[in-house]
Amino acid sequence: MVFQLEELQEMVRRGMDTQRAREYGLDLLEANRIQPAPRMFINYELSQALKNEHGAKPMKEIVQFAQEMKKPVVVPIHRSLKRHRAV
């Protein structure tokens, strides 16, 4: 996946529309499976990386973050909600 995003970066450098490349990159990252706030962050970072802006995060970090955000969130059950059994 990192390789594909780096290829997109090269295509933008050669003249591909940045917005189309970003949308394709978000599809590769399956951003539709990520909550809105982290998805906006990924959108911004991917846009910066594709344009090769100074200080942009490496593609590897963007991919790792996107993969972490796709993991299901486990909410612990508060102990006051657990049922007590009589012994």
Image (cartoon, rainbow, N blue to C red):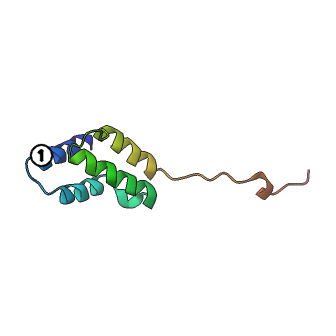
| Quarter of the image where one finds residue 49 | top left
Question: Where does the image place residue 70, in percent across and percent down from the top left?
Answer: 43, 52
Residue drawn at the location 21% of the way across and 59% of the way down: 19
Residue drawn at the location 14% of the way across and 49% of the way down: 12
Farthest-out residue, left: 14
Q: Is residue 74 visible?
A: yes
Number of marks drawn: 1
Instruction: Determine whether the residue tagged by mark 1 lies in a helix, strand or loop.
Output: helix
Farthest-out residue, front: 54
Q: In the image shown, does 53 or 70 lie closer to the viewer?
A: 53
Residue drawn at the location 28% of the way across and 57% of the way down: 27
Q: Is residue 35 visible?
A: no
Question: Where does the image place residue 71, in percent across and percent down from the top left?
Answer: 47, 50
Residue at mark 1: 13
Decide if residue 32 is on the left or right side of residue 54: right
Question: Where does the image place residue 24, in percent across and percent down from the top left?
Answer: 23, 57
Q: In the image shown, does 27 or 48 lie closer to the viewer?
A: 48
Q: Residues within 10 Å of mark 1 (few under 14, many from 20)?
A: some
Q: In the image shown, does 86 or 31 lie closer to the viewer?
A: 31
Quarter of the picture containing the N terminus is top left
Residue drawn at the location 22% of the way across and 40% of the way down: 3
The amino acid marked with disc number 1 is Arg
Question: Where does the image place residue 43, in percent across and percent down from the top left?
Answer: 33, 55
